[in-house]
Image: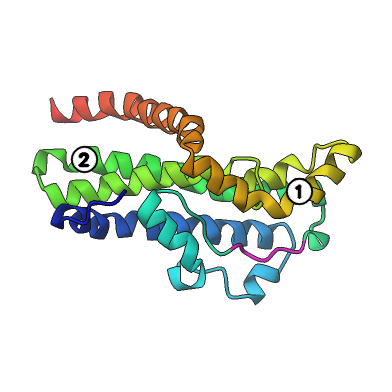
């Protein structure tokens, strides 16, 4: 499965900034969103920070390095503190995903801006920044617990379906690993990742063509 060549470790090292940025901004966004909606729990837990050590889940980080999908340490949130519980959960759940998409867009813009420099290392670092941010956004919006998408899904489930959800939510990570190792996860999210990447490229390239001309 793994080809531990010098190129493998070279790309692994260059991908680290992208992974750490995606994780840190995603989780910090959750924290600030919760805080803005009236819940001080993330602030009290010291999660309103870009320090990746506060957000890294060791297994999720290793998984992201090896398999290009992974997760961070969830930011503790108490929905009971929200002024509007439903609105609060939607805002908090979407904040990380939207932050990753903004970073991906900016990362791609930076990548296109440095293309004329022909600096391979810088270009690869920026490429990994926008790729991992798109991947992290798309992966987290999947409606399987404990991912962000599941936190939105439960708000709209009818009572009977909600009971079924709570009954099986403990198996969420097992389901994700099964999807990943059977290749089904890639079949589901890769078209979305490629679509977002193509959309950003289609928006940015004409702008940089004007700059370069």
**For residue 168, which numbered disc appears in the image?**
1
Number of numbered discs overlaid on the protein picture: 2
Q: Secondary structure at mark 2?
A: helix
Residue at 84% x, 38% y is 161
- Which x, y percent locates residue 189? 49, 34
Specify whether residue 37 is in view. Answer: yes
Label 1 Cα neighbours within 10 Å, binned few <14 / some 14-19 / many ≥20: few
Residue at 82% x, 56% y is 83
Quarter of the rendering containing residue 97: top right
Please name whichever residue, 181 or 67, is drawn nearer the observer in this view of the structure. 181
41 to the left or right of 186? right
34 to the left or right of 59? right
**For residue 80, which numbered disc appears in the image?**
none
**For residue 113, which numbered disc appears in the image?**
2
Span highlighted in magenta in the image: 74-78
Q: Residue furthest right?
A: 159
Quarter of the rendering containing residue 20: bottom left
119 above or below 202? below
34 to the left or right of 55? right
Residue at 58% x, 41% y is 141
Residue at 81% x, 52% y is 85
Quarter of the rendering containing residue 206: top left
149 to the left or right of 158? left
Q: Secondary structure at mark 1?
A: helix
């Amino acid at each position: 499965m793994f080809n531990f060549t010098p190129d493998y470790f070279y790309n692994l090292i260059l991908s680290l900034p992208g992974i750490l940025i995606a994780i840190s901004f995603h989780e910090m966004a959750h924290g600030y969103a919760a805080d803005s909606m009236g819940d001080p729990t993330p602030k009290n837990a010291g999660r309103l920070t870009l320090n990746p050590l506060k957000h890294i889940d060791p297994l999720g980080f290793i998984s992201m390095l090896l398999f290009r999908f992974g997760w961070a340490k969830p930011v503790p949130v108490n929905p009971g503190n929200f002024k509007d519980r439903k609105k609060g959960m939607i805002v908090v759940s979407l904040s990380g995903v939207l932050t990753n998409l903004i970073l991906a867009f900016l990362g791609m813009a930076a990548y296109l801006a440095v293309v004329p420099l022909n600096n391979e290392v810088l270009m690869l670092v920026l490429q990994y920044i926008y790729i991992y941010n798109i991947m992290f956004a798309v992966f987290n919006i999947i409606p399987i617990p404990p991912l962000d998408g599941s936190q939105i899904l439960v708000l709209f489930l009818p009572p009977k379906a909600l009971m079924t959800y709570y009954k099986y939510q403990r198996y969420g990570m097992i389901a994700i690993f099964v999807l990943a190792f059977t290749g089904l996860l890639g079949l589901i999210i890769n078209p979305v990742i490629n679509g977002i990447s193509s959309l950003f490229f289609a928006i940015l390239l004409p702008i940089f063509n004007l700059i370069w001309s």
